[in-house]
Amino acid sequence: MATGSGEESTSAIMDDYETLISTTDVELLKRAWRNEKAAPEILQYESSLVQRIKEQIELAEQNVEMFEADSIDPLTVSLYQMDLDRTQFLLRSYLRVRLQKIEEYLFHILKTDEYLNRLSKQEQMFARRCTDDLGNHLDETVLSKLPDNYQSILKQSITSEEDDMDFLAFDCDKVQEVADLIIFPWSYSSYSYGRHTYKIMIRLNEFIFTRKTHGNYRDGARFTYLCMLQVHKEAFGEGENRFGVSIDPTTLIIVVVINNRK
Amino acid sequence: MAGQSDSHLSLFSPEEVEFMAEDELVEIVPNLRMDSLNFICGDYGPFYPQIATQVPFWLAVALKKRGKCTIRPPQWMSIENLTQVLEGERDSHAFQPLPFHYVEISRLLFDHAREDIPDIYMVRSLVEDIRDVRFHKVETNLEKFTASTVTWKNMSAMEVNIIRAFSGRALQAFYKHENEQVMPDTDRTQDRQPQIPTIRPKRNLKPR
């Protein structure tokens, strides 16, 4: 069929050309750009490719300047300029997409070596400066007014699950250092979790307030975090003196169950 | 911030799809003499009057704008071919084979190379009809989305771009819902352990 052969010949020409130009740097950059745009996570930085493209761009810029100085006809100059613009656009867009992803996944990238290694040196510097700036900003506006346990932005970052689940088990002697608390208005006689039974007694007047308290009361479901305190079993025993601290990751509230061992 | 046109990272704007289409080759007939051009993206030329040569689209359009060449419409843009394609689109549920960037290429040609296309009105209406029929097929196929692999052949760049973000999210949602049935949420069962006399309704933890 005439149409079939027409399409085949065009596509055959295209294929040959594709294989020819697939090795050009521009084509590689275009592929890297497309991949970076489409992938949800940040990909490996193409340092050698970017370096080569940068050199070619600089060469082309010098060419254009030379042409203008020698007053080569403006058509040629403008065509070279267009090619230069296109390549610059690809490079800039590639770098911009990466920066955008770094900003979005800032803490996660800095904490995971695998992702950190995919960044170029400048991008790593950028990421660190970003966290510093963010940290300073949050410190000035909010964090300095919160109790000590909250002041690390890393712990409160919603991108991280592990840090949020941090908890501190205090020795009863250090109870005074415990900061803000949410007090449960009711008391439990015993709480079972897993194989252990914890006896918990809470008396309102025995809690220590160092700074302001938060107004919400959480229900007992929060006590599921106590399961982690199995590690510190020796702190628990029968009787009324028991304590633990856990941090609620969703609402920035510390739930503290304390009782002094007198 | 280092953002671009779209808030969502993975979307290509139509201009960017056109940018990619502009690297496709097209045949031109220059009417001037020019030495070869050594671009970063490749070498083209030298150009002799009335000798056809292949250049990327952006170069062809640039030359055409300055009246330095005429563009030969590609083979697939003939009226016979397009009529056949249109009939094929209407008759079957599958997509007819068309060049990947046919939308962008035809658009560029209509905008810049009117006089180079014979019967341009006919060609234009055919291409628009083809676009409509194909997009209508895309819409109906979207309704048949399932969680398993989705294969649609012969889609073009523009059509793919339009549904790319949506289909990615849809497949993810399918995966999430299917997995919840397989793996029940273990957090919920632990919550029920403490026997608390509470009047307040339990607040479910947000699954992470």
Image (cartoon, rainbow, N blue to C red):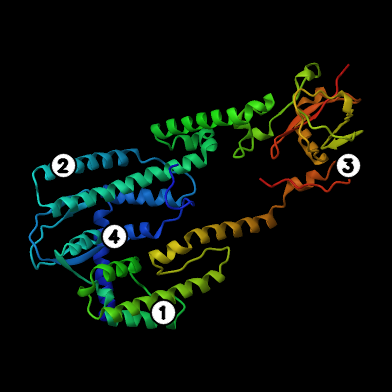
Which mark sits nearer the N-terminus, 4 or 3?
4
- Chain under numbered label 3: B
Work out how far the residue at label 1 is from the one at label 4, CA to CA, in angstroms. Answer: 26 Å
- Give the numbered dot on residue B22: 4
Q: Residue at x 80, y 39 (%)?
A: A218
Q: Identify whether A45 is placed above or below B4.
A: above
Say which of B25 and B49 sits in front: B49
Which mark sits nearer the N-terminus, 1 or 3?
1
Q: Local crowd at mark 4 within 10 Å, few (<14), some, or many (≥20)?
A: many
- Under circle 2, the secondary element is helix
Q: Residue at x 31, y 38 (%)?
A: A48
Q: Which residue is mark 1?
A: B89
- Give the numbered dot on residue A141: none
Give amino acid for label 2. Answer: Glu
Q: Which residue is mark 2?
A: A65
Which mark sits nearer the N-terminus, 1 or 4?
4
Work out how far the residue at label 2 is from the one at label 1, CA to CA, in angstroms. Answer: 51 Å
Q: Identify whether A8 is placed above or below A42.
A: below
Which tag is nearer the camera, tag 1 or tag 4?
4
- Under circle 3, the secondary element is loop
Please identify the quarter of the rendering in which residue A206 is found. top right
